Image (tube, helix red, strand yellow):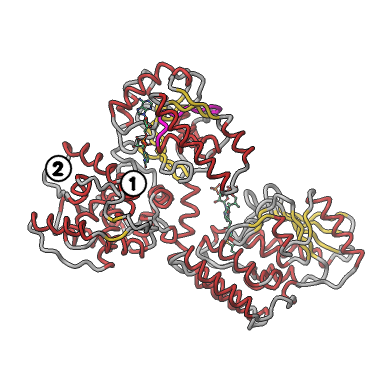
Amino acid sequence: MESPVNLEIIQNIAILTIRNPPVNALSHAVRLNIMSALNNAERNESISAIIVMGEGNTFPAGADITEFGLPPKSPLLPIVCDRIEQFNKPVICAMHGTPLGGGLEIALSCHYRLAHPQTKLGLPEVHLGLIPGAGGTQRLPRLIGLPEAFKIAASGVPISARKAAEIGLINEIIEDIKDESIIFTNKVVSLNKKISRTCDITRHLKESPHTNREMSELRASFAKSHRGQVAPGKIADCIEATLEMPFDKGQVLERATFAELLLTDQSNGLIHAFFAERKSSKIPEASRTTPRPLNKIGVVGGGTMGSGIAIAALNAGIPVTMIEQDTESIKKGQHNVEKVYKRDIEKGRLSESVVNDILAQFNTSTDFDSLSQVDMVIEAVFEEMPVKQKVFQILNQVIKPGGILASNTSYLDINEIAAVTSRPSDVIGLHFFSPANIMRLLEIVVPKKVSDDVVATGFSLAKKMRKIPVRAGVCDGFIGNRILNNYGDCAAFMMEDGATPYEIDKAIFDFGYPMGPHQMFDLAGGDIGWATRKRLEPFRDPQSRYVHIADKLCENGWFGQKTGRGFYRYDTGNKRGNEDPAVLEIIEQERQRKGVIPKTFSHEEIIQRYMAAMINEAAEVVREGIALRPSDVDVTKLFGYGFPRYRGGPMKYADTYGLDKILADLQEFAKEDPLFWTPSKLIVELVKKGHNFDSLNK
Ligand code: 3HC
Ligand code: NAI
């Protein structure tokens, strides 16, 4: 087997190339081979300096995350970094791609750092609930100062090579990684200067009121942006320790903190999310086929979703033709698209000329024949089956053979939509989330007769749009909305039984969601849920519990933010809304009408019930094959519904909480309402076998 580290000698320079595709992660084998390459280079007296680089796409993008949680194997990365730093010949790194995490920590240990202009450098460990664990919190502040180091490590956002050069993180930007780094190294050798090691730099290690103030402001700001997460504060502790401790003691603190965080639920949740996000695009259809071309797209409907989808496609470089039912509506659709780009110009996100180029790819029409040449059309008209079926009958006529017919329906049966066409194998669901140009989730809904290459094309569209695709089967609401309806019901039951919507929202917000369910209903529009409830009324089990409170609000015209009133009042400019005594009055009337004696719910019990309802329905979604695997449910809830990422998603949360405990909760709640709380057979079966949801992800 080829060594993951190659040592090439060019005259007096040794070039150490790390080659561990796809991202040159610093696995045990890589670490071992770096050490032996360094030993060889040290022994070889003809070598005066070493260049470290990465083969393929990138300089190492970090430690090998798949090794986290396994017994640590020597040499650990901090030891490799120390060995590089203490090397007795100059070590120069030549970076390209994404030197991240441990990769950047290797670079910080080198004596000189060079980077290609397109390089993105960063410490993203915080996104895994960790701190940099191979000297990053000790070397980076010594090199660029405490506040800059804290910003990079606590945000986890990579910086450009230009910015890195400006703040002194790199010495030079080079266009040709190999040739120019050799020229640079030859200069270093000929100057024969004393080696400068990052661990010895002291110029930034002075306490100053300015630095203290800046650090405490940054601490507060990251505590807010990473609400509920421990890693940013720990990063600050380690970075500030550089002012009090010598380098080696600081490293010990960093390593202990890293090891401690690796064992936390937060880190487990975030690492699970990292892999779940990548796994969701691994679908059976991909191995059987290739996607169809996607050079032109049609969008039918220019309302909230149609305009967002059009923007998402245009931003992905795909020309769009939008169709509306009449001249006035198409003008609105066009305006909906243009106003987003206008805002981008005002905010300085895009230049006027870039926007002009994008909009040159955007056409509008009221004539369906304008869609004759598109490769895919995405329908986003009203959520009514007859309206959608009528549109699909027309699309069946006008779309060229091989063109794909997609629906953005939130709930409706795509098999029924496909059935009105003569080519159901071309029909698929593409469920975008609002705002479609921003939200990253895309549920790809796979009806019975669709062909594999159409499914694969849905995934290729997601990739072009930089969205996270999740494969879903057909059922009412697919993965995300189906589960939402269940915990939405649970919230309604708790409200009728004694909790206020405000108490429920507060508990859910404190759990880590950006907002509670009632704030979310107010934002999305109460009328949307109302329409669904009315549509499902004929199919509702007469034995099932139904809470009328939300309907009562809708009957008053209180649809949420858009009408200034819903569960909250929005008439004082408070974006989050104010509690409304009139809503509490309606709730009280409903309790009295049904003879409910209200009880008190603690925040813990609210979470316990809300999660049990969510997980129980999610288990059914997996059991029925609507989701391919539990981690796909996690991805759906993380990217479409605001589930706190550091908890990994509802299925990961269930595993962490204990699936046996979830089952016990369900059984307890089932004593009150067996119909709603019957435990999913999948949960019962997994608990019986002593397995968890993650066992189904393998
Ligand atoms: N370890 C193990 N596998 C990794 C990895 C890593 N650090 N980074 C990426 N991969 C894997 C992915 O899981 C994926 O595998 P798959 O093909 O089987 O699904 C494959 O590499 C390609 O990854 P992407 O699909 O994400 O490729 P992109 O080109 O879109 O993105 C990237 C590349 C920007 C490097 C992105 O993968 C990324 O952000 N990786 C994580 C970087 C990171 O978090 N580094 C820090 C690690 S922790 C650390 O270093 C601790 C240290 O301080 C001690
Ligand atoms: P909307 O009411 O904002 O827009 C619908 C548009 O379709 C209107 O502009 C209307 O003029 C147009 N339209 C109606 N019939 C048409 C026809 N025969 N031909 C051409 N255009 C026609 O509705 P919205 O919110 O954009 O929803 C559209 C679809 O997206 C629905 O199926 C909805 O369930 C789904 N959806 C909505 C989400 C949301 O948050 N609003 C989220 C995800 C999906």
Which is nearer the eye, 31 or 304?
Answer: 304
Name of the residue lying farthest toward the front? 572
Name of the residue lying farthest toward the right? 190
Residue type of the residue flagged with mark 2: Asp
**To which residue does mark 2 refer?**
541
Q: Which residues are magenta?
A: 294-303
Residue type of the residue flagged with mark 1: Lys
Apparent side of residue 640 relative to residue 467 in the rendered image (left or right): left
**Residue 653, which numbered label?**
none
Which is nearer the eye, 236 or 315?
Answer: 315
Q: Is residue 457 above or below residue 572?
A: above
Magenta highlight: main SS: loop
List x then y, in percent, for residue 535.
Answer: 22, 36
Residue 580 location, quadrant: bottom left
Which is nearer the eye, 311 or 328?
Answer: 328
Q: How many marks?
A: 2
**Crowd band around label 1 with a 10 angstrom C-alpha radius: few (<14), some (14–19), many (20+):** some
**To which residue does mark 1 refer?**
562
Which is nearer the eye, 144 or 429?
Answer: 144
Q: Is residue 590 above or below residue 462?
A: below
- The answer, for residue 149, to whether it is visible in the render is yes
Apparent side of residue 650 relative to residue 13 in the rendered image (left or right): left
Q: Look at 38% across and 36% down and name the residue there.
A: 445
Q: Is residue 567 magenta?
A: no
List x then y, in percent, for residue 114.
Answer: 77, 58
